[in-house]
Structure formats: C-alpha cells, structure tokens
Amino acid sequence: MIDIRPFSSLGKANFGWLNANHHFSFGHYMDPQRMAWGRLRVWNDDEIAPGTGFDPHPHRDMEIITYVREGAITHRDNMGNEGRTEAGDVQIMSAGSGVVHAEYNLEPTTTRIFQIWIMPDRRGVKPAWGAKQFPKEQREAGFEVLASGRPQDGGNGALPINVDGAVLATTMKKGQSLVQALAPGRAAYIVPARGAVTVNGTPASARDGIAIRDETEFTITATEDAELVMVEVAAD
C-alpha cells in the first residue's frame, strides 16, 4: 500500500507569524482518516516568521523531532537546555514525565521545519533534549538515521528516542534510485522537503506525504534533485 497525500490536501492553519500544514489531525484540523500512521502521530510542515515562535508551553509522553529545512530554530526549556539548530540538522525532545519548552525563530528570514511527533513505547521517563549536525553529503542516495530507538541502530550516532522507530533522511540527484526495505508489521511515512520523486512508479512532489505499509520493499527514484525525510515505526 502506497498512499500519496498531496500537499494541497493537508490541514491548514495560518496565524500570520505561523503558517502550518498538518499531515495528521492537529489543533483545529480534524480528519478521522488521518489520525496517525502507526506510532507516528504528528507531522507538521511549519513556516515561522522572523522574530517569532512558540512561547513556553508543556508536553508529556511524546517524542518530538524537529527537522530544520531552512533557517534555524532556537530551543529553550525548563531543564536548562538552550540550543540553535540549523537547516539540515535535527533536534529531539523526549517529553517523558513533563517538560516546558519554547521554540523561536531568531533569524532575519523565515524558518521552515518539519515537526514530527511519535508516540513513545515507555511513559513517564525522564525528559531529555538533544541536537546534532548531520552533513547532507553523507546521505546521498541512501537513508541516514538521524534519530532512533530501534535496537539495530544502537551506537550509530543517531539521536536517541524512546520508541522502536527512526527518523531518516536522504538527498538524491535527478535520476538516482534507491531500494528501501520495510519489515513486516512496520510502516513508513516519507515527505520530500524539496524536489520530486516516484515511489514504485507513483509520483510525489515537494511536501506531499507518502504513506507506506504492507510493502516488503519499495523503490524511490528522483525525477528532480530531492531531499527526503522518512519516519519508520511499528504499523500498529
């Protein structure tokens, strides 16, 4: 099963300072057919105006991963963490037993992010935050693991999350292809941050959602230079 969800079909919310596009039901956007994809609960495509951002607010029992597409995001929380994450890099926040954080665009230009929420396997764990640089040249035509709680990814340098799942990314030049395996009982969700691809011959454009399950493997071919982000999780 490969379901292409065009960017135009996503939930929309524009607050002036924030232009949000929701792949799954979130806030005022509710679609019973798009509540989650396995353990993946939220994928927001956010554009944040310069000098604005999300003021301090709480979370608990959720793994929150931010992939910065353009610009940078500055994080602050009540654990004393503060950091700036730039385009192509990743930050994770395991909300666990509870955390209060803020996210700001302190840059002179618009910041564009994917914010991804994955339901954890363990509730009430100690909250944590981390960020890391991932040079894009190391992920050409092959997915690099950016954040993971999968047993097979231990020690590979990925940021740790409290779920048997992973966030991965790749860059592809026009004409390149890659074959990606998907184990039984697993689901994948892919969004091109830029460019265009086909997945098993089905076309998808920048910022479309590509929902995949019940496929042992699939082939991605870049029809334009592309950058893709993928979440792989348990299907149920």
Image: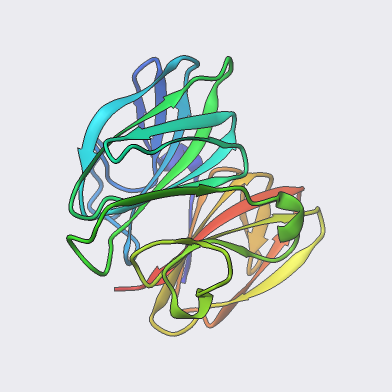
Q: Residue at x 23, y 55 (%)?
A: 96
Residue 93 appears in the rendering: no
In-front residue for pair 102/25: 102
Q: Residue at x 46, y 14 (%)?
A: 51
Q: Is residue 35 left or right of residue 12?
A: left
Residue 83 appears in the rendering: yes
Q: Is residue 96 left or right of residue 161?
A: left
Snapshot colouring: rainbow
Residue most extreme to the front: 80
Q: Residue at x 28, y 63 (%)?
A: 120
Q: Is residue 166 left or right of residue 101?
A: right
Residue 44 in the image, given as x and y percentages of width and height: 40, 41
In-front residue for pair 215/161: 161
In-front residue for pair 225/30: 225
In the picture shown, does residue 99 fall above or below 164? above
Q: Quadrant of residue 219?
A: bottom right
Residue 174 in the image, given as x and y percentages of width and height: 81, 53
Q: Is residue 218 left or right of residue 27?
A: right
In-front residue for pair 190/92: 92
Q: Residue at x 64, y 65 (%)?
A: 143
Residue 125 in the image, given as x and y percentages of width and height: 22, 61
